[in-house]
Amino acid sequence: MAASTQTARVVVTGGAGFIGVHSVEALLAAGGEVLVIDDLRHASYRRLPESARVEVADVAEAQAREAIRTWKPTAILHLAAQGGVNRSWREPAEDAHINVLGTVSVLTAAMAAGCRRVVVASSGGALYGAARRLPTPEDEPTQPRSPYGTAKLSIEHYLGHFTRAGSLDALALRYGNVYGPGQDGTGEAGVVAISSHRLLAGTAPVIRGDGSQTRDFTYVGDIVAANLLGLGSSVTGAINIGTGRETGIGDLVRRLCALAGYAGEPELEPLPPGEVARSALDSSLAAERLGWRPGVTLDDGLARTLESFRDQVQ
């Protein structure tokens, strides 16, 4: 995909993180210029390309706003976030600071820089909660069950406000559960990365609850394709980005065990509060309005991810 006018000069907040590095690579490969704004607290083990400019800053602070204002991007991809649901329960004020105040700060900077196009990473499962319809379409009522989900919903309200006011053309992409090479396997979010890390270290993977809860696992390469399509479009509002398929956590872990040649039994832990029982996203609107469809199967994506972890430890 060649760089469009809107993707010619892009700020990527959180660009040193998991999804960020993949997105920066794709934008640069398409011929765009990229300024990464990241505090590097959750940087991916994948290194940023040398041609990307980097501003080390907290997106909620004045330094980041000034970097955006002076660089004058044609579009902003806002990925910087506190991404842990469990952490949001322990530290809801910090979660709101990063996710809500950080986003409002970026939107304010976009307006000051004369940049109308902003695409923001939102969340499907965290917003819909106990959805009545599966796969879940965008018109399903939002009922977040964690501070993290509540923050994402607040962000979307801000996006809608500034778009209706005529200040921005903003789009929220409601991701499924993103996985793939470059994700942190030592944290507390991202069951594919955590399980891959543990399996290759010879330790048992962990399943919370009985493993029957389902998620819509979406490969990072497909997420990146949606990001670029969103940046290059004029679509506003909120759009789901997922496969539409439910996968049980227990089934996922068993697939990874088979790929890793691990014959032991997983460890079991209690479910955390607010855990969503089932999740799958209807992405028909993404196909219609962005021309996006998922392209990587779960088995292929898991194999690629596990292999990337093998390469990391060798």
Image (cartoon, rainbow, N blue to C red):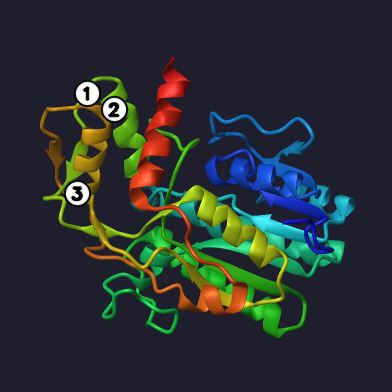
* Residue positioned 53% across, 36% down in the render: 42
Q: Nearer the viewer, residue 165 or 196?
A: 196
Residue 198 badge: 2
Q: Are marks 1 and 2 in contact (CB under 8 Å)?
A: yes
Residue 55: image quadrant is top right
Residue 220 drawn at (x, y percent): 50, 49
Circle 1 SS class: loop
Q: Please give the residue where the numbered disc 3 appears in the rendered image.
A: 251
Residue 203 badge: 1
Residue 89 drawn at (x, y percent): 34, 52
Q: Indicate the amino acid at tag 1.
A: Thr
Q: Indicate the amino acid at tag 2.
A: Arg
Q: Indicate the amino acid at tag 3.
A: Asp
Residue 97 drawn at (x, y percent): 55, 54
Circle 3 SS class: helix
* Above/below status of 269 relative to 115: above
Q: Quadrant of the C terminus?
A: top left
Mark 2 or mark 3: whose residue is earlier in sequence: 2
